[in-house]
Amino acid sequence: MIRVEPRNANSAIFSYGVPILSAFVALILASIPLWLAGAPVLISYVEMAKGVFGSKFAFSEMLTRATPLMFTGLAAALAFRAKLWNIGAEGQLYLGAIAAVAIGTGYIEAPAFILLPLIIAFGCAAGSVGMVVPAILKTRYGADEVVTTLLLNFIIIIFLQYMLEGPLKDPMGLGWPQSSPILDQGMLPPLMERMRVHSGLIIAIVCALIAQFMLARSVWGFKLRAVGENVFAARHAGIKVNRTILGAAAISGALAGMAGVSEVAGLKGYLTSDLSPGFGYAGIIVAMLAGLSPIGVVISALFIASVFVGADSMSRAMSVSSYLADLVVSTSLLCVLIGGFFSRFKLVRAKLEGKN
Amino acid sequence: MTSSPVLTLNGLSKTFGSVQAAQSINLELFKGEVLALLGENGAGKTTLMNMLFGHYMPDSGSIDIFDSSGTANQLQLGNPQAAIAAGIGMVHQHFTLAENLDALDNIMLGSEKFLELRRNKSRAMQKVQKIMNDSGLVAPMNVAVGKLTVGERQRVEILKALYRDVKILVLDEPTAVLTPQEADKLFDNITAMTQNGLSVIFISHKLREVLAFSNRIAVLRHGRKVGEISSKEANERKIARLMVGEETKVFSRKKLEVGEPVLEVDNLTISGSSKRESISDINLSVNKHEILGIAGISGNGQTILANAISGLVKPSSGKIKIDGENILSFDPSNIIQAGVGRIPEDRHKDGIVGQMSVAENMIIEDLNSSKIQSRGLLNHEAIMRYCSDLSSKYDVRGPGPNASARLLSGGNIQKLILARVFEAFPKLILANQPTRGLDMGAAADVANRLLEARQRGSGVILISEDLDEILSLSDRIMVIYDGKLRIAETHDRETLGLMMAGEAA
């Protein structure tokens, strides 16, 4: 008989070594389909590395891809720390993007130092609403937030399509379902000349640092952790559980909304219904990989973006199917998640003594 | 009664951590006999039966099963399958039936071969019919179990055991959920079954039925067998005395002049979803410098009463006044602020956040205090200092203030909770089963702290099923039974034992 037991103390070797080892195992496993597809494995991996670190442009593309993942990863991590299962970051991202476009495409004419904060504030508020509503349903009526947030994603995407065909449709867009472009003074400034990476990245990292600090050192973070780890003891100790959950929901939704703002006002400039290739869902993986630590989210978002961008570039360079890139991505994620499990738990063989 | 044994337990022992749940218990069961196993909660009854049934592996000891020719066969320990094969059947207190299947399916479940293609329901039905005729245990077979009454479900449970041709049937508190009439009928059926050679062990703490329906009574206390008595020679007083013991722990409890009331509970009623979660018309008051002991076997409403005073459940009606002021909002944080310190019954679940550090658990009830935070930010150094001060003052031993609280032993978790509660200088302390599961040293520490609080001027409610503890610490004693609270006029063990068992004193 084999049982699973939590490890009592995590040694440093474990907490740093396991993710690295898992990534390594992932590369070995992913080489099997590569080899079967007839691509030279070693060269493929060199191409993959080049796709991320090979040039300033490649690296900046990776950072661009990591930015929304950091926001949605933080959104998931903070909610999950309170055991609030926000699966709706995708929808909240779009709510944020819709708000950004509604404010930023000329509705308000203002200089950048007014317009940009306004866009961010409205985007975050819209994302926030998208999570607070399911949280109220949960605290008031016990509705399972996994179901409500997940289903809200679909509702929001249909709402988005309506907005893009109707009120937000660009009159100059030749009939395409897309919004008007955000005014120049409403755009997040780029970080490097002629590169796509933008200041949303800085905002994401600052958000992560603040979240890390607040979780560890603030009363608010203390309550959030207590509610997440043991809701019974938290309630018994006089912590207002529902209020804490609603607070976590508001922050989580705002961060997901910020992902939408950052994509639309930092990268694309206008809103289409394919703004996010599933950043909201990928954020869950980013958060799990990070062990729900905000700083960890930054690192795991960089890792996942590297794998995404690198694998894409590799599949193009080696002219193998782009599905192989997806395969590499999912293998790495599975390995690192399993590795994370084993760094937190150990398997114990249960003894069966005294057989007569 | 024939005298050939069917089962002997030889020196069975089991420890859980530092708790000795069973200490070399010997027990014999004869053919056609009804043996009652009596004892307070935590006395070791269920542990013993779980060892017999192979759910627990004993630390030492052996079990012999005798076949029809009288030869002893040692039972393989720690293996439920071996126990079933040896003809031991167990009916648990909480039913283990699949509610969406009909009774016959439930009975057949588990005794069919895994890969059998055809289910022979009619043959099974014949067999069940015969058992029903022999024992008088009748239940509808083709109705989903979810639609049956509690009494019928229990008969299905027993039929399920009998269907497997058991020779020894263990019933764990079979009457806990039955009406008195149903219970009487059940015992008639059991008597009928023993005539056909079945031996029965039944666990209970209802003295009346034990005396009326068993042949022999074995009493357990603190994991030991403290007495065995033939039912004919027994009476309620004798058994009550055996159950609760006679030794008294000695604590220096000075006489104190009681002060003003700190807690008054008026006509408190809570209608929960089950009997265990309901209390009716509770009236009590606790004064300064006073310990009110509430004795009772758990499951009689203590938990819900404590939860109401802690602000965790809203009463259906009634008032709770602290220092004369009605606590209207019934919210734990208000209750804490009003000066109530709570030592929860389930310290792992309600007392600590296991994944958070020892230091964090020390301050969890005091997050607004300017000692540990300013403007919403925690002062880490101050918290660490506070935690190490309290750890030495209250002797909390463990891997340090930064370690997860779940790594502490039960006794040290309780000391952590005591530290948290006592440092708030509460007007009222609500201690619910504060020494359950603790070793002697830690238990004595808790008791001394409660006396210290009484000395200091707090009122204390001590809810416990350990009569020794109640008797040695309390100024006044009340007994809770079936959701109702009664004052114990005389503080002697036998009266209290009878009141705890629901008998008029």
Image: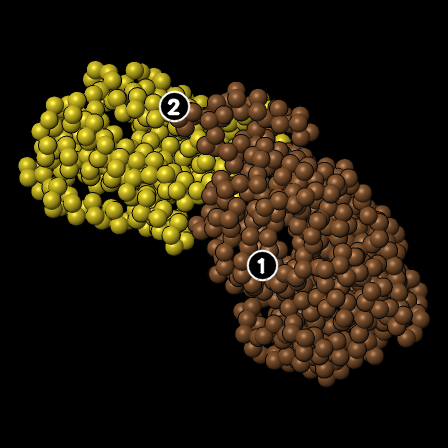
Q: Nearer the viewer, residue B455 or B76?
A: B455
Q: Residue drawn at (55%, 55%), measured in percent from left and top?
A: B265
Q: Residue drawn at (66%, 40%), measured in percent from left and top?
A: B454
Residue B138 visible:
yes
Which residue, given by chain and number where applicable, does mark 2 sit on?
A: A209
Q: How crowded is mark 2: few (under 14 residues within 10 Å), some or many (20 or more)?
A: some
Q: What residue type is labelled 1?
A: Asn
Q: How crowded is mark 1: few (under 14 residues within 10 Å), some or many (20 or more)?
A: some
**Residue B304 image label:** none
A82 with respect to B405 (left or right): left
Residue B414 point in image, percent of width and height: 65, 38
The quadrant of the rendering that contains the C terminus of chain B is: bottom right
- Spatial distance from mark 1 to mark 2, Cα to Cα? 54 Å
- Same chain shared by disc 1 and disc 2: no
Residue A36 visible:
no
Q: Residue drawn at (41%, 40%), measured in percent from left and top?
A: A244
Q: Nearer the viewer, residue B487 or B410?
A: B487
Q: Nearer the viewer, residue B491 or A296?
A: B491
Residue B448 point in image, percent of width and height: 72, 38
Residue B450 point in image, percent of width and height: 68, 40
Q: Give the colour of chain B.
A: brown
B74 with respect to B461 (left or right): right
* Count of numbered badges drawn on the protein: 2
Residue A139 point in image, percent of width and height: 39, 49
Q: What residue type is labelled 2?
A: Leu
Q: Classify mark 2: helix, strand or loop.
A: helix
**Residue B283 image label:** 1
Determine the image quadrant of residue B80.
Answer: bottom right
Q: Give the colour of chain A.
A: yellow
The quadrant of the rendering that contains the N terminus of chain B is: bottom right
Q: Which chain carries label 2?
A: A
